């Protein structure tokens, strides 16, 4: 809607915007509709209506679209991007500072932020806004022209239902009547209203241009106090009308419009320095440019983006380059206050010609990287490389390849720069770490180790060498070779790298690798200690880094707790961390947290929640591009379906995991094969299952992945092969720090050499860890043994326990549970009698209360004792409680 | 709005305002039919509506003039919702219909146009979609 015209026909939209702003479950709004329909005006009215609540606006423009933070810079501190490099840590630092700055603007509430022409905002600004919108600090109102693609960040939020999409349409006939009445400040002839409404089709910008032209050429005039259109306009389409409007500008006015079309929004002093001030004033009066006060800055922009589009389409290339050069000169002389301005300068110099220093290009490239704008980052870095800034350019280009998950590009880059032979140690190590990690993620463990090892030999600097050693240790730990990992760390532990170990960053990385190695070895107490040491070292880092790396240590501690059989503690730890990860939009952390929660439920024997967590993990893994985690999560889904007894779905999930290929993560292969074996066992192929489990367990033993080995050996106990594995399980209880493996060994012991006490201890130990399925299976086995030995009472009590455990596990099932006789349930009458007896009523009292004979009550009680496996009234209370 | 419509609005309003007490009373009864407001608020709002329309009707030829006296006209009315304003509008037109002994189709059409305009004029001041007034009060 034209700026000078009163807002008409948009109150319902404003009302909805206000309601969504108040609703904390809505993260923001996308206003979409055709050009000229009044989206920007509606957004601006929302900001005005919300005052004094915190508000701000940013405008997308082609000139600033490839300038990192080009749109958002004016809302952020000038030193936001100070001292930043090109890595993930720097990105975290930038986001942290930006978040603090915008939170400060938001105060206690939500910052209502108009994102005008959101499709032309730079990626860095959008990436910054994503977590802020998710955590509710910012409520964006984004405008976007119908038919244009929504930026990926906003599209994903809209898809998740976090953003509401509101369509702004044409005005109705009665709204056109009211608007013209208000805009012309008097009655309008009915026929004229109809014509203007029909030609404009209710489009505000078209209506405005028609009225402006009509007033200018006298075809719309007041006759006897009524506005009347005496002649139909020659131009009727929006772009045609706007072109006509622009064609009427004189040379000086045209120059102002051209400068703004190329530059986007400019400060008024810049415009006045580049063009004629009187012309600017005339353009404001003609409603072609708008002058707005933003804090202490007075800004000038075209009133409608289509003016800019029409001008740019007509502008000869040389004229555009000349304007870009003049803008760059002006910026260089007067305007550079922040790093984003350097990025703008670099863009203008590259586009308009002229010399630009490589450090400016590298600065711009890094800023682009921080916003994941890989195209801009690459263009800037390559330009910097040709101007001699090889080290920095190589790092930026490596980050670009990593961000794009383009391993061949990274390989080619490393080869190119390696052979150039001009890299310093720091850059060499940086590239080697990136390539090593990328190769590992792609399943190439030996390639990953090769580059880490060869670089470690090649570099001379202590810290660089230490970094390569940590990299190798981490690779070994993650690949399921814990003993080799711990061995690799030895030189650092022994102080071979001098001061390096005092650096908290090295200690966090080392601690993470050590924790993973110990988890794999089943040394869970040591793993927890290492995870906590990692957290402590992490806290010594600057705040933004401390927050970012913490998730890995939390996940390690939770895994150690889980594998040791402390499910509740593991769950509690991860659930609280997951909330933070969701708020921060940390996808990779969320993936592994969901996997941990899925594993906790799996080990408890709760199939349904297990499937839910692993399903959520697969979706997150796809979004985060985490292939290794995806394989893991899909296998987890299969395990959940197995627990529910849904064998077909379990098989389908295993088939899917097979198609996803190999994952280099420790025990990934073993976990999948173990799941396949359990599926075979459930389908009756017990011999095949045992053979496969034996093979998997042997591989685990060879690799030193004892935690996993104990689980697989225990599967053999569950399949009635306890005598074959009892010795190894006993050995594992001494190698590992796990109450779960102790309980597993107790079960194996009871199976091999059964007596009532051993069965009781085994079931009790498994139940105490929360491993409900294992406890239920053990109790089933015990019940059968008691039956065989003529102890019906003990067998019945065990069966009642099985029933309770199965219920607690949400109806878990397995072939052993299905084969066993079920616990006999009490009839409603028996339960009534049992409750009265447990509360101390005599048989006579119960008989009187229930109007039956005492003999009938006693008969009920006999059956109740048998079913519950109790000796008499004294044990009834606890037995009933258990049920 | 064209001149005929403005004339129709002014003419019927003048007739209704011959007995403003009756107009207010009928407006109250119409509001009661379509509003969940408290009775005391209905009476206050009906009185405000009659007073506000009396200011607005003479401004139909120059609606921009409303902005100068808007604050005094809006006066005691509390921030309203869109639903309330829509109910106000329907109640007023039906009250006029009853008081003047039946509006013609042309007159009713003219009043709908006029109340659209009035709604936009007072809406700017009465609607508070972001509860900004409430936040200031707090």
Image (spheres, coloured by chain):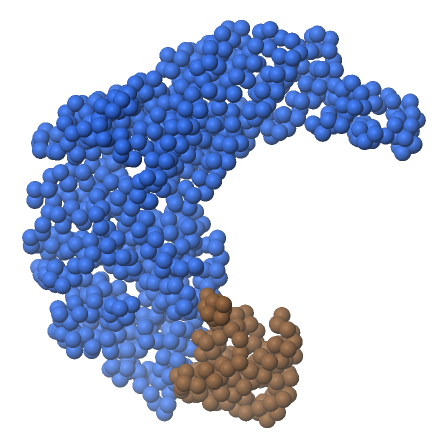
Chain colours: A blue, B brown
Give the residue drawn at x 48%, y 55%: A24
Q: Nearer the viewer, residue A764 or A793?
A: A764
- Residue B34 at what x, y percent from top left? 62, 72
| Residue A751, visible in the rendered structure | yes
Whether residue B42 sits left or right of residue A870 in the image: it is left
Q: Nearer the viewer, residue B72 or A325?
A: B72
Residue found at the very far bottom of the displayed protein: B18
Q: Quadrant of the C terminus of chain A?
A: top right
Q: Nearer the viewer, residue A648 or A423?
A: A423
Give the residue drawn at x 42%, y 17%: A706
- Residue A587 at what x, y percent from top left? 38, 40
| Residue A623, visible in the rendered structure | no
Give the residue drawn at x 20%, y 53%: A339
Q: Quadrant of the N terminus of chain A?
A: bottom left
Whether residue B4 sits left or right of residue A477 in the image: it is right
Q: Relative to residue A800, is residue A591 depicted above or below? A: below
Whether residue A827 sits left or right of residue A211 in the image: it is right
- Residue B46 at what x, y percent from top left? 59, 81
Give the residue drawn at x 15%, y 37%: A394
């Amino acid at each position: 809607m034209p700026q000078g015209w009163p807002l008409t026909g948009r109150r319902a939209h404003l009302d909805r915007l206000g309601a969504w702003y108040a609703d904390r479950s809505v993260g923001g709004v996308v206003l979409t509709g055709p050009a000229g329909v009044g989206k920007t005006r509606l957004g601006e009215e929302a900001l005005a209506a919300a005052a004094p609540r915190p508000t701000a606006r940013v405008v997308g423009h082609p000139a600033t679209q490839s300038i990192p933070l080009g749109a958002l810079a004016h809302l952020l501190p000038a030193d936001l991007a100070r001292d930043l490099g090109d890595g993930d840590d720097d990105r975290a630092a930038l986001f942290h500072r930006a978040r603090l700055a915008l939170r400060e603007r938001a105060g206690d509430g939500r910052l209502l932020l108009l994102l005008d022409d959101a499709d032309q905002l730079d990626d860095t600004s959008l990436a910054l806004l994503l977590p802020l919108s998710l955590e509710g600090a910012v409520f964006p109102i984004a405008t976007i022209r119908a038919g244009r693609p929504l930026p990926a960040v906003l599209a994903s939020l809209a898809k998740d239902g976090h953003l509401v999409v509101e369509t702004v349409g044409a005005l109705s006939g009665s709204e056109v009547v009211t608007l013209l009445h208000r805009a012309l400040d008097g009655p309008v002839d009915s026929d004229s209203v109809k014509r203007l409404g029909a030609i404009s089709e209710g489009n505000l910008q078209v209506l405005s241009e028609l009225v402006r032209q009509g007033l200018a050429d006298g075809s719309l005039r007041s006759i006897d106090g009524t506005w009347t259109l005496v002649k139909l306009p020659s131009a009727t389409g929006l772009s045609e009308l706007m072109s006509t409007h622009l064609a009427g500008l004189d040379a000086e006015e045209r120059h102002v419009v051209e400068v703004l079309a190329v530059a986007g929004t400019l400060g008024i002093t810049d415009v006045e320095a580049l063009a004629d001030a009187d012309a600017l004033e005339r353009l404001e009066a003609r409603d072609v440019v708008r002058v707005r006060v933003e804090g202490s800055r007075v800004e000038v922009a075209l009133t409608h983006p289509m003016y800019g589009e029409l001008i740019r389409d007509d502008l000869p290339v040389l004229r555009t380059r000349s304007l870009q050069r003049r803008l760059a000169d002006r910026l260089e002389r007067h305007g550079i206050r922040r790093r984003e301005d350097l990025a703008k300068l670099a863009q203008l110099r590259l586009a308009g010609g002229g010399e630009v220093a490589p450090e400016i290009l590298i600065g711009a490239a890094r800023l682009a990287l921080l916003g994941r704008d890989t195209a801009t980052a690459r263009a800037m870095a390559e330009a910097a490389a040709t101007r001699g800034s090889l080290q920095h350019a190589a790092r930026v280009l490596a980050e670009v390849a990593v961000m794009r998950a383009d391993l061949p590009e990274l390989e080619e880059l490393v080869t190119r720069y390696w052979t150039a032979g001009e890299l310093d140690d720091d850059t060499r190590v940086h590239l080697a770490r990136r390539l090593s990690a990328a190769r590992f993620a792609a399943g190439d463990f030996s390639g990953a180790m090769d580059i880490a090892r060869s670089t470690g030999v090649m570099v001379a600097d202590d810290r660089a060498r230490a970094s390569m050693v940590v990299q190798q240790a981490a690779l070994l730990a993650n690949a399921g070779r814990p003993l080799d990992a711990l061995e690799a760390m030895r030189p650092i532990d022994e102080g071979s790298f001098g001061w390096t170990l005092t650096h908290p960053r090295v200690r966090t990385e080392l601690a993470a690798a050590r924790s993973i190695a110990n988890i794999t070895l089943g040394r869970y107490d040591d793993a927890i200690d290492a995870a906590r040491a990692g957290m402590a070292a992490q806290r010594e880092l600057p705040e933004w880094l401390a927050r970012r790396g913490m998730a890995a240590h939390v996940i390690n501690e939770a895994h150690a707790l889980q594998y040791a059989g402390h499910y509740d503690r593991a769950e509690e730890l991860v659930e609280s961390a997951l909330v933070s990860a969701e708020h921060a939009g940390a996808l990779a952390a969320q993936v592994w947290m969901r996997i941990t929660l899925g594993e906790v439920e799996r080990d408890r024997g709760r199939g349904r929640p297990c499937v839910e967590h692993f399903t959520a993990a697969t979706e997150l893994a796809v979004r985060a591009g985490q292939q290794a985690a995806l394989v893991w999560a899909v296998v987890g889904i299969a395990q959940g379906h197995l627990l529910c007894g849904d064998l077909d779905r379990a098989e389908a999930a295993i088939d899917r995991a097979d198609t996803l290929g190999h994952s280099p993560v420790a025990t990934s292969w073993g976990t999948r094969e173990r799941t396949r074996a359990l599926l075979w066992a459930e389908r009756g192929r017990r011999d095949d299952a045992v053979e496969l489990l034996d093979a998997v367990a042997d591989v685990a033993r060879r690799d030193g992945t004892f935690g996993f080995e104990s689980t697989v050996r225990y599967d053999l106990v569950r399949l009635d092969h306890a005598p074959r594995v009892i010795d190894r399980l006993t050995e594992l209880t001494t190698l590992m720090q796990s109450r779960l493996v102790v309980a597993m060994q107790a079960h194996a012991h009871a199976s091999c050499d059964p007596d009532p006490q051993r069965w009781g201890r085994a079931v009790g130990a498994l139940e105490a860890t929360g491993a409900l399925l294992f406890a239920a299976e053990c109790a089933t086995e015990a019940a059968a043994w008691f039956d065989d030995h003529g102890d019906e009472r003990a067998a019945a009590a065990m069966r009642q326990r099985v029933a309770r455990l199965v219920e607690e596990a949400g109806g878990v099932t397995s072939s052993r549970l299905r084969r066993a006789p079920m616990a006999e349930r009490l009839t409603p009458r028996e339960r009534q009698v049992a409750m009265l007896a447990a509360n101390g009523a005599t048989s006579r009292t119960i008989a009187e209360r229930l109007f039956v004979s005492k003999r009938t009550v006693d008969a009920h009680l006999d059956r109740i004792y048998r079913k519950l496996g109790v000796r008499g009234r004294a044990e009834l209370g606890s037995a009933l409680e258990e049920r | 709005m064209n001149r005929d419509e403005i004339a129709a609005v002014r003419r019927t309003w003048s007739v209704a305002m011959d007995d403003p007490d009756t107009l207010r009373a009928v407006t109250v009864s119409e509001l009661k039919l379509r509003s969940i407001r408290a009775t005391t608020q209905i009476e206050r709002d009906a009185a405000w509506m009659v007073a506000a329309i009396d200011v607005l009707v003479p401004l139909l030829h120059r609606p921009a003039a409303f902005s100068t006296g808007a604050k005094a006209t809006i006066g005691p009315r509390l921030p309203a919702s869109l639903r309330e304003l829509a109910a106000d509008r329907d109640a007023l037109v039906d009250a006029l219909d009853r008081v003047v002994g039946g509006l013609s189709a042309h007159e009713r059409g003219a009043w709908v146009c006029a109340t659209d305009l009035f709604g936009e004029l007072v809406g700017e001041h009465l609607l508070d979609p972001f509860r900004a007034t409430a936040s200031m009060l707090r």
